[in-house]
Structures are given as structure tokens and as C-alpha cells.
Amino acid sequence: MDCYTANWNPLGDSAFYRKYELYSMDWDLKEELRDCLVAAAPYGGPIALLRNPWRKEKTASMRPVLDIYSASGMPLASLLWKSGPVVSLGWSAEEELLCVQEDGAVLVYGLHGDFRRHFSMGNEVLQNRVLDARIFHTEFGSGVAILTGAHRFTLSANVGDLKLRRMPEVPGLQSAPSCWTTLCQDRVAQILLAVGPDLYLLDHAACSAVTPPGLAPGVSSFLQMAVSFTYRHLALFTDTGYIWMGTASLKEKLCEFNCNIRAPPKQMVWCSRPRSKERAVVVAWERRLMVVGDAPESIQFVLDEDSYLVPELDGVRIFSRSTHEFLHEVPVASEEIFKIASMAPGALLLEAQKEYEKESQKADEYLREIQELGQLTQAVQQCIEAAGHEHQPDMQKSLLRAASFGKCFLDRFPPDSFVHMCQDLRVLNAVRDYHIGIPLTYRKYRYKQLTIQVLLDRLVLRRLYPLAIQICEYLRLPEVQGVSRILAHWACYKVQQKDVSDEDVARAINQKLGDTPGVSYSDIAARAYGCGRTELAIKLLEYEPRSGEQVPLLLKMKRSKLALSKAIESGDTDLVFTVLLHLKNELNRGDFFMTLRNQPMALSLYRQFCKHQELETLKDLYNQDDNHQELGSFHIRASYAAEERIEGRVAALQTAADAFYKAKNEFAAKATEDQMRLLRLQRRLEDELGGQFLDLSLHDTATTLILGGHNKRAEQLARDFRIPDKRLWWLKLTALADLEDWEELEKFSKSKKSPIGYLPFVEICMKQHNKYEAKKYASRVGPEQKVKALLLVGDVAQAADVAIEHRNEAELSLVLSHCTGATDGATADKIQRARAQAQKK
Amino acid sequence: MAFPHRPDAPELPDFSMLKRLARDQLIYLLEQLPGKKDLFIEADLMSPLDRIANVSILKQHEVDKLYKVENKPALSSNEHKLLACRAAFLFSVDLVNADKLAGRTRKYKVIFSPQKFYACEMVLEEEGIYGDVSCDEWAFSLLPLDVDLLSMELPEFFRDYFLEGDQRWINTVAQALHLLSTLYGSFPNCYGIGRCAKMSYELWRKLEEEEDGETKGRRPEIGHIFLLDRDVDFVTALCSQVVYEGLVDDTFRIKCGSVDFGPEVTSSDKSLKVLLNAEDKVFNEIRNEHFSNVFGFLSQKARNLQAQYDRRRGMDIKQMKNFVSQELKGLKQEHRLLSLHIGACESIMKKKTKQDFQELIKTEHALLEGFNIRESTSYIEEHIDRQVSPIESLRLMCLLSITENGLIPKDYRSLKTQYLQSYGPDHLLTFSNLRRAGLLTEQAPGDTLTAVESKVSKLVTDKAAGKITDAFSSLAKRSNFRAISKKLNLIPRVDGEYDLKVPRDMAYVFSGAYVPLSCRIVEQVLERRSWQGLDEVVRLLNCSEFAFTDMTKDDKASSESLRLILVVFLGGCTFSEVSALRFLGREKGYRFIFLTTAVTNSARLMEAMSEVKA
């Protein structure tokens, strides 16, 4: 273990930096890196190389080739570059490769070299060509900054939501700046550029000259500048070999260093850890790598090969043709444990555990020492934390073993941190694997942006579905977030395999997915349709349990009729309606109606709509169906609702009558014709007699006539329209009583024998409170209703007599119930007697 | 007199939660348009809104003025306008356009309740104002009218579904059921009869499946759910109601759980809006009573009240103080209610105890029992000739038709002719509607089907048609009332007088003449816990395909919950049915909860079918 700190290099008094190998690269590069355009995505992302970017020859063999590798050098894609000359490459936060061309066009490729889309950086860029370009990341996404041939800057802070911003002109700028970079402060992207000894800061409004505080004198030009991963710090390299390090706001200097090398460095990047006080910059020349910070000395490495630096959140990745290394500041926990002769609790615990395994009593001594200081909890925590920072599984294991050992001596140590660390490390080790090639550090995974969801997305992006699913299962993620999401992605990928038949793909997908919750077959089908596989899409939709989800896609695929039956199946009327309107626009009217005919549910829905919105269409619908009954009703409705003039109404009724005849509804037809006659008659009556007749019913018309004293006309009307006798009598009776024309009423009553009897006469007279008249008719009431009539006129005594005569029990009780108080006492007695007599018999 | 519940009767779930839910949602919607705003409300929504949020709540959320939506543009000065409406929406178009013409731009929000239909948006778009308004949904589908009565307040459901075959509202029903099962646990036992019941049920199940998890673990509070289509039993809904609550509804029209008592009831010159529910103690005791008992009860109550007032004589100061501070208010309240109900009773008596009404009831009973058909028919004819009431006549005709499996052709024609002569020929449309809904039909001579019917039967055999309704299918239906009545023993055989004071069965809600068919079905199915043994009845109801039972083996359901039954009436239920089932519940130790698309009665049914606006 003594050699463990062998690769630790001290920088100043307090910090160590170490560099270790992540992978030996698997790629078989023929070119030197310096001959390629290189771009590596942060967070252990993929590496893109564009070979021969500057060759102008048109021969096929010499065309530029774009290769994409994983961080371990596994080839992911390779394609021949056929577009224009590329100035710069870069990866977006979603791991899409952005290729900035000389003409300002940006081509976007996926991880597997699949072309996604392209966009242009504007006309100005097109005219002046691109001199230089940078892809940068902010919290909003990935941006592109461009320096044009006219020495102007254009940038877009987020390529996902492209808004081009042309930066203000730098006064007096005649040649390209010696170096420049993008900054991001207060959520605004800025550009810092160096021209000779001057620095300018460009934001979207203005260009201002800036001077870094405490800059050593004698600078005539800046050769390189670097901004840290979080945009908080800035480093400047001058032609005097002097490095200034400060805040990105240029308000504060942190430290400076003079390396006495005047050659312009190839790359300069920050190497710092979040929440660490140490700041360091890594500067790379052709054969030399230097880590400088707030210390008089620097750490120097010799580079055997042409290397490329990738700034990361907590360090720097360095890859060359043969290796891929990671350089970072040794984290506190590791430092405490592994520093030579460290007496930190973690270090003691690790030692104790080792002794314990050797079955040595020293274990106890160490343990006691920690316990005496009361630092066992801290020791366990340190070991757990340090395990996270180790790259080698062996070392992780021994640290975790130490932690687990220490835990045994603690009463109450919350197990979460240990369990989580074990889980996290398993996941990290799995993705760090050579075949996967995502060299994530624990810090990147746990503390900052990258979450398990993003990690899963990245795996999915690399089509590493089985691993992703294993991780989900291992971490017991809920199905909807985990397994089924990944399966859905897999299915979306599967449908793109054009060499497999529709049948097989559909079956394979269904076999894998079954009815896993959270999987949307319609999404997969939409993808299949997107790839031009309509048949496959339809097959996949069959598996979709929610018919509501099937419909929109079916419509999009122009399978409207299928969509209609699916919509009806779903029972969702809204959906049916959506399809209907679609169909209405898509089909000609005849076909549309025919389709409706076979779908009664849709038909009634559409009818309802037409009733409110398109009455004319409704008529057409009925016509189409030869539904004469409804057509007749339609015209009748129209005659009452729409037509004002009487001619119009009669005409509408005529049409209705015709329809009813066709519908073989003689009754309705006759009734309609009668109404036409009545309407005409009413008009005539209005003309001749004045008053209001229109729209009265036949009954009311007759009543109005009688009330107006036109008895003759009323009778004529009754004859013409065959008003039954009974009705006529009721009608006349009521009307005459209303008029209180008792004389006429009496005449009428004697005109012939009443078809309704004479009880109604009594009733109605009583209603008008004319007892005198009522009595007249009471005598004429037939025997079976006599009692009722007599009671109505209030002649209880006579009623009693009649009832007794009839020997009708019901009538007797009825009379009895009308006997009130003293006046009818005698009558009541009489009835009782009669009853008693009847009972005797 | 009012029958108490059995001591072991289960507690009802707390439905006030639904009210709170609806209110919170409304407030959320109001707050979406900050600042002062005017609220335009469709007439149909006025009363339900009033039950959910009173004016002061609206004011709190900066509603400046309230308008009832009419077809004329209202002048209002506020920047924001809120429109709350059902599926009808044309007026909002006018409103917005009027403002547009006047060159004013304002913020509009159209709130659709209980659901926004795609068609609504479409119309807005076609009218060219889609961009000017924002749309929202107020998913307010369940209004608790009483502790055991939930109404969806969708009176249009009846016509839309049973006449027009429009299935829009079924989704709303399914969502209401979904809401209930989310709040009160899923229902372990489900029964249903009717096409609409089946569709609603299936749709609801689908909703439950889509939204898995959450509700699964809940302990069910309600053990049974029973869905019933109105067209399974039109007869009950067509009968005159004689139970107090039903009678009040028939006479004064209970709207959204409250009634407007006119001056003749309040015995003052003002009308009074009274909330009728279990909180009204007087009403609560008489609501389920046969009307003949009500008066006696009320006078007894008045005497008790007097006695309580009288206690104050001979009280010392301390007792008096107690009396005034504690009891007096309650007594006063009771007094007020008592006088109101006495007034209502008087008013009803005046209208109903006349000979006409007796005759009417007699005829109805004759129709139900199926004797003296000729006499009843001529009674109806006279009723029409005398222009007694268009709605009543229509109702009697329908009752005759349904109980007799359709009118004989001669009567069918003559009654219709008479009716048209009395009330105008535009009722031709009404008759066509009634025929379509199967309410008023002609006895088919033999089995020859008309052209339309054969078309329908073709559709029904069609594979796709298995799931769909067509309004025409009711044409082919026969009501078979007489046979059903015999099978289910709906007409009680009574020796001597039926004691309405101490009823023996549910028939008391119709003076002992008839047990409501719908309630009998519920009773029978609950007894058997399935439709088993009722095959013949189901066949006679033409519902062979639409009767279903679904039981989940769920041990979590407590015996308490198993005695709570939710009865869902699709197309409306009457107060008589509610009373009858309440009675059944008391007899058997159940508690029934009612969910209806709207409270209905015979007059409302007829008006829904009528094309002529009264």
C-alpha cells in the first residue's frame, strides 16, 4: 500500500493531484490527433474525430471521414463527410454532435452518426464565412458561438430554441483576435476576446474594454484563455509565459504563475473540484503537461504522445492515441485516508480492518484508538466517501469493507449512505466498463446535473438496453420510470430495423413489452409511421389498449374509417366527433353520409351537431337515408321556427305532407294537410273578423269564434274539420259559461240530447258560481250521476233521497261525507236509518 | 310516525366533500383571470352554482357582476369576462362578437361544465373567436342535493340519450362514477340493467384501469352499485306522485333541492325560496309520507310545538333565561318551517283533493292494474277534449300505451287527432318523438315489422352494432308491462283497506296500488345478489344483453359497507322512487344512496319529449 500515493503530486502545501489511467484506447488511429478535428463530450461522453478536415482534394479516398468513438475508444459510427468544409465540432448536452461548417450551416448528428437536422447561423455568417466556432454549455442548453471572417461574433445560447444574436462590433478590430472564449454570467452569454494587449467583453448590448486586476506588466498579447467548467473562473496565458488566474467577472485575481515558456500552449483548461478551495489550470504543449496553481512550483508531466484535454466538472480527462487518463485533485476523504502516516480516523479504520483480516490483535488497538477519540462514525463516513472516489473496484471494496467493519462497533449508524454508495458504485463500475465506456466519476454522477434518469437516457442513446434494464431492476426503479420507458425506447429503435418484416417486428415488440404499464404502443406506432411503415404502425396500434390513443395516429395515417370505428369503440364522443369532422373534410358528401349510415352512434352524434349548427345538412342527411318521416318532421319544425310568412309556412307544411305520404304515414300527412287548411282559414278569419286567430289550435279557434259571438262560423268550422260532437259540446259549454250567456247555453242544451251528459253543465255552472242555472241542469242529469250533481248544487237532502232510492252504498257514504254540522243532521239520520234498513234486508 | 332507521343501519359517507371539491375548482378557475371580472352564467347552471358558491364567495374572488346569459348582449364595463356554460355555447359567440364590433378587446374565458366537448371548441373556431377566448373545464358533475341524494343536474340527459341517441353524457357519467370511487373506494359489487347502464359501466371500468394504483388500496365505503336506465321503467316515472316530497315536486317544482313557495303558501305577499333537505327537520319527517298522513302529522307537530312554547309559563327567571337562549331559536325555526309546510299542504290540497284529481288517480290505478281499459281511454279522451292540461293528457296517453303494449290503432289515431285539435298540430313532432322513445306507440299488427324496424334489426345483427345504440331500436321494443307486473307482483293484492300509515311494502308511495318497477328490480337483485332467476323479467324488459353483475372478491369490504347501496338512475329518478327505496332500506337495514342525472317527474319527462315550448 505504500506505493498507493506514488502517483500523487503535491501542488503547494495542501493539495495533491493525481493522474490515473481510465482505459487504454481501443481505437486504431492511423492519424495523429493533431491532424484531426477533435471533440469530446463532457461527463465521460463520446469522442468525435474528423479526419483530413483540411484536405481540399476531391478524390474519394481523401474525403474527410467522421468517426465517433466511445470514451474507451470503441467505434460507434464512421461516415464519409460529404458536406462542406467543417470548422468546428462539438457535442451538445444531449450528446448530439454539432458540426459547424464554413458557410455557417450547423449539421446535427446523433451518437450513431445518424443525421438529425441542420440549421443555419444566419446570412451574415454565410457571407463572411466562419473563421472559428465554439460549442458551449450553459444551464439552458448548448450554445454555438461563431467568429466570422468579418471579425464579428454571432451566437445562439440554445440550439434547441434557436435565437441568433449578433454581437456588437469591436472598435478598431482589423484582424482575428489572438484568442477568445464564451462566458456566461447572470444567465447571459458573453464573449471575451483578446486583441494584442487589450481585452474586450462583448454582451448583446455593448462592447467594453476590460483589464484583469493585478496583471503583471509587459504583456503585449494573450495567447490562450480558459474558462472553468462552471464559468466561475478565468485563466489567461500571455506571450511572456505568464498565467493570470482570477474570477470570470475579472474583478478579482486569485493567483498568478510564471512558467517562462513563451511558446503558445496547445490547450489550457481548468482543473478544479466543486467546493474545493484549490484552483489549478492544466496547460498542455506538444510534449509537456503542466499543472499550475497557487504555488511557486508546478507539477509537470511529460507527454509521450499527442494528447487532447477534456475539461470535466471535477478534473480533466486526457486522451491520446493509446491511453485515456484522468487528472484531478485528490479528494479530501482519500487524502486523509491515504496520506502517508495519516492518523485520520478513516485511515486508522482501514488499517484496523486489514489487521483484523490478518487476525492480528492490532486491529483492536487501532479500533480502540478511534473509539477513544470518539471518531468512529466519522471514520466510517470517511471510508464510505473515499470508496466513491476510487476508480479501482479492489480499492473500493477494501474501503467499503473497512466501513462495514467499523459499522459493527456503532450502535446507531444510519445504513443509507453505505447502501447507496454500494449501489452507486455498482452502477458506476458497470458503465465505466470498457465495453460501455462512460467514465463517470462518483461526484459527477451523484452531486451534479447527471442523475440516474439521465444516465439511463445515455445508455438508451447508446442502445445499451439490456444494461439499462438491469440497472433499473437493480435499483428497483418504478416500472413507469424505469423498465417500461426503456422498453418503449427499444421498441422505437426496433421499428427502424427495415430489414425485418412488419409481422416479426410487431410480434417481437409485443412479446417483450406485453402489457407493461406505462408503455404507450401508440408512441411506438407513431415512430413506426415516422419511418414510413404504416402497416407496422397499424399492427402496433392493435396492441394499444386505450382506443383513445389509437385514433389521432390513425387519422394522421389517413385511416379515417378505421379511426372512426376505434373512436366509437372507445365510447368517447369527443373522439368520434374529431374523426367525424376529419372525415367530413376528407370525403365527399355522399361517401361521408354512407360512412355515417353504417355507424349509428356517429350518425346520431352528427345529427345532434347539425341540429344546432347546420340545419341544411340535416335535411340532406335525411334525404340520403330516404328517411321521409324525419324529413317531414324537419319541415314541420321549419314551418314553425323558421318561416315568418304564412305562404312560406304553408309551403313548408306541404313539403312535410308530401314527405309523410312517402313515409306511408297517412295520419301525419292528413294532420298536416288539415293544418294547412286551418292556417288558410285562420288567415281569412283574421281578415274578415279581425282579432288573433293564427297559430291557435282547432279547439281554440272554435272557442275564440264562440267567444266572439260567431256561433254559426264555429259550427261551420266544426263541420269542416270534423270536430267530434263530444268535443264540440264541451267546447261550447265552456265558452258559453265563460261568456255567462246562460240563455244561449240553455238553448244549446236543449238543441239535442247532450253527448256528454248534463253533469258537466252542472259542474261548469257551479264553477261560475251560478247555482240557479246549475240547478236547472241538475234535474236533467242521468240517474247514475244524479247524486253527484245534487251534491254539487248543494242539495244534500235531495241527494240523500236519491241515494236511498238507489240503495247504493257508495253513494250513501258520499252524501254522508257531505253532511256538515247541524243543518244536515236530519239528512244524516235518514241515511243512517236507510243503511240500517238495507243491512237488515 | 316517521320511521326511524334500524339501529344497525350503516352511516352514510360524507358527500359534502364533493361540494368542497367543486367549489375549490371554481375558485381556481376564477383566480385564473385576476382582477375584476363579470360572470355570465347559463340559466341551467344558475341553481347548481348557487348551491356550490354563494354570491359572497364569488365576490371574494373579484366577481363584479353576475349575469344570466340571454341572447342579448349585456353591457358590462369590466376587463374580464367569464362565461360558464353547458354544451350550448352560441351565446358566448354573440357576446364576444358584440364586443368585437364595438371595438373593445377583453379577456374572455369560457368555462364548460361539466365537460368541454370538442364540438364546443370547433364552433368557437368556426365563429372565428377561438383565438379571443380561453377555454376551461369545470368538472362539476356531482351536486349533493341531500345526505343521500347526488344529482348530476343534467336534465338534458334524458332527451339527448333516450330520444336523440346522443351518447355524449355517458362519458360524464363514467367520470362521475370514477370520482366517487376515487373518493369513497371502489364498489365491490356492481349490477346494472339497460344499454346506457352497461356502456357507462364499461367506460368507467376503462377509466379505472387506465388510472391504476392509488384507489386500489382504499377500503370500499359503498358495497354495491346498481345502474338503471330510465327506459327500463317509464311507468313509475309517469305516475302521479302522492308522497309528500314528490307531490311538492309535482306541484311547485323542486329545483336543485330548493323550492319557490309562492304567496299562496307563505301567506304573505312574497315568495320564499326554501331549501328542502334533511336539515329541515319538519320536512325530513314528512318527506317520505303518503300525503294523507301529512296533515295529521303536521297538526300533531303544531300541538307539540305549542306545548313546548307553553312550558315557559310557570318558569322562574333562570329557567326562562335558559329557555330563551337555548330552545327558543330552535322552536322559532321549527315554527317557521311548520307554517310553511302547512301552507304548502293547504295549497296542494286545494289543487289535488278536487274530484278531478281523484278521478285521475283512479284512472291511473285502473291503467296500472289493467282493467276498464275502455273507460280509461274515454276518460283520457275527455281529458284532452276539455283541454285540462297538455302535459297531463300526454302523460296519460303514454301510461296507457306502455301498460297496454301500445295503443290499438284506432285509439292511437283518434287520441292523437283529438290532441292535435286541442293543442295544435305542431305536436305532431311531439308524437313522433314519443314514438321514437317508445313512450307512445301503436300496437303492431302481428309481427310484421315496418320498414324502419327491419332496417334496425339488420343493424343489430351487424357485428359492430353490438355496442351501439340506435334510437330506433326502441321501436321494436315492446314494454310487456302486464307480464312483468305479474312476474314481479307489482300490484299488491290487498284484502280491505291498504294502511297508508303503517305501510307494508313500497306500494305505499302510490297509495298501495303499485310497487315501483325500478325499485322492485333493485330489491330483487339485491336479494339474490345477481340477476339469477330473473331471466324471464330481463327478457321481458328487452334487456337480455344489458343486464350485468360484476363482483370482485374483496374481503376488505366491511359488512357495514355491504349494506350501503348506490343506485344510479340514468335519465332521472323521481322522489317517489327515492321514498320507496328509503322505505325498503329501513325494512331491510340497508341505506340507499341515489345518484341521478337529474331529479325528474312525469311533467319533466313529457316536456323533454315535447317539441312545443310551453
Image (tube, grey):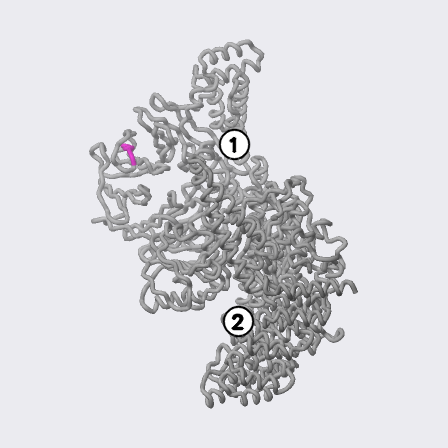
Q: Which residue is mark 1?
A: A424
Q: Quadrant of the C terminus of chain A?
A: bottom right
Q: Do the numbered discs 2 and 1 sit on residues whose CB atoms are within 8 Å?
A: no
Q: Nearer the viewer, residue A336 or A241?
A: A336
Predominant SS along the magenta part: strand
Whether labels 2 and 1 share one chain: yes
Q: Residue at x 36, y 32 (%)?
A: A282
Left or right: A452, with A53 as reference point: right
Q: Nearer the viewer, residue A701 or A299?
A: A701
Position of A326 relative to A126 (above/below): above
Asked which secondary structure carries label 2, the reply is helix
Asked which secondary structure carries label 1, the reply is helix
Q: How many marks?
A: 2
Q: What are the residue bounds of the magenta stretch?
A: A242-247
The residue type indicated by label 2 comes to Lys
Position of A741 relative to A509 (above/below): below
The residue type indicated by label 1 comes to Asp
Rendering coords of residue A45 (x, y %): 47, 40
Q: Which mark is residue A611?
A: 2
